[in-house]
Image: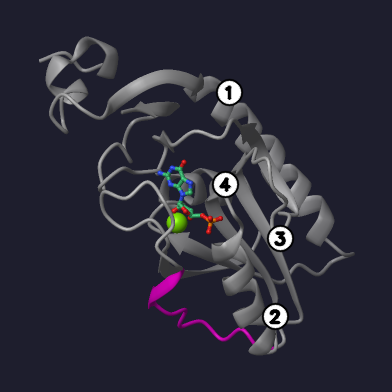
Amino acid sequence: MADRWDQNPVALKTVGDNPRLGQVLISQTQIAERVKDLAGEIIRSYHQGESFDLVIVAIMTGSLIFLADLVRAMPLPIRIAIMMVSNYPGASMESKGVKINYDVKEEISGKHVLVVDDILDTGQTLFTVAALLRERGAKSVRTCVLLDKLLPEPKCIAADFVGFQVPNKFVVGYGLDYDNLFRNYPAIAVLEV
Ligand code: 5GP
Ligand code: MG
């Protein structure tokens, strides 16, 4: 069996004939370079003198792969906590409302918190999570997304750290799913319906 996605007819047919992987928007190499730069930006902005104190709250499951690469490019003492939040559950390509399925267990009060997510679409997810963590007494709450989707209308939140901007299309790969598939595709591609 071919070990590359583009040579593997089985991989490309995982969800039947439709929908399937379309145009690759961001390559593996581009992601790797940008994630390293992003980690540098984050480190510089949180590093004050000798002290560095940060809790990363990662929104699962979409941020899984991004998180793993990002934190390994940050050689500092970081605490990692997770939250499971769904807005586009299962095989949906439109928002069903933000739902917290698993809440963060790490102590947030008095901490600098960086919320990490895969993609900023309407902003409802990040807005809801950031507000909740502020309510719980975080010293600061900032946000980081790999992707920011270009929408015609204004968003309820802007991310502090952004990897790439993408067009207003449903994208998958590098952690982003459709019906929990394609998360392990290593680049960012448009889902063709
Ligand atoms: P928002 O709450 O900003 O509208 O949507 C953010 C969440 O919706 C992300 O955490 C992600 O799970 C999901 N989402 C939004 N757009 C896309 C997309 O194009 N592809 C995938 N796979 N998920 C998306
Ligand atoms: Mg999500």
Q: Are marks 2 and 1 in contact (CB under 8 Å)?
A: no
The amino acid type found where label 4 is placed reads Leu
Mark 4 burial class by Cα count in 10 Å: few <14, some 14-19, many 20+:
many
- Mark 1 or 3, which is nearer the eye? 3
Q: To which residue does mark 4 refer?
A: 70
Q: Mark 2 and mark 3 in contact (Cβ < 8 Å)?
A: no
Q: Kindly identify which residue carries mark 3.
A: 157
156 or 67, which lies in front?
Answer: 156
* Mark 3 secondary-structure assignment: loop
Work out which residue is located at the far top of the displayed protein and give it. 7
Which structural element holds mark 1? helix
Q: Residue at x 42, y 37 (%)?
A: 174
Residue 193's tag is none
Label number found at residue 30: 1
Q: Quadrant of residue 125?
A: bottom right
Tell me the quarter of the image containing the C terminus.
top left
Task: Report which quarter residue 110 is drawn in.
Answer: bottom right
Residue 173's place in the image compared with 60, above or below, is above
* Three-letter amino acid code of the residue under disc 2: Lys
Would residue 47 appear left or right of 111 to someone viewing this image?
A: right
| First of labels 4, 3 by sequence position | 4
**Residue 126 in magenta?**
no
Q: Which circle's residue, 2 or 4, is located before the other in the chain?
A: 4
Question: Percent position (x, y) of residue 45?
Answer: 83, 56
Q: Is residue 135 left or right of residue 61?
A: right
What residue is shown with label 2? 111
- Which of marks 4 and 1 precedes in the sequence? 1
Q: What segment is highlighted magenta in the picture?
A: 98-109
Secondary structure character of the magenta stretch overall: loop
Mark nearer the viewer, 1 or 4: 1
Counting from the top left corner in percent of width and height, residue 28 is at 48, 24
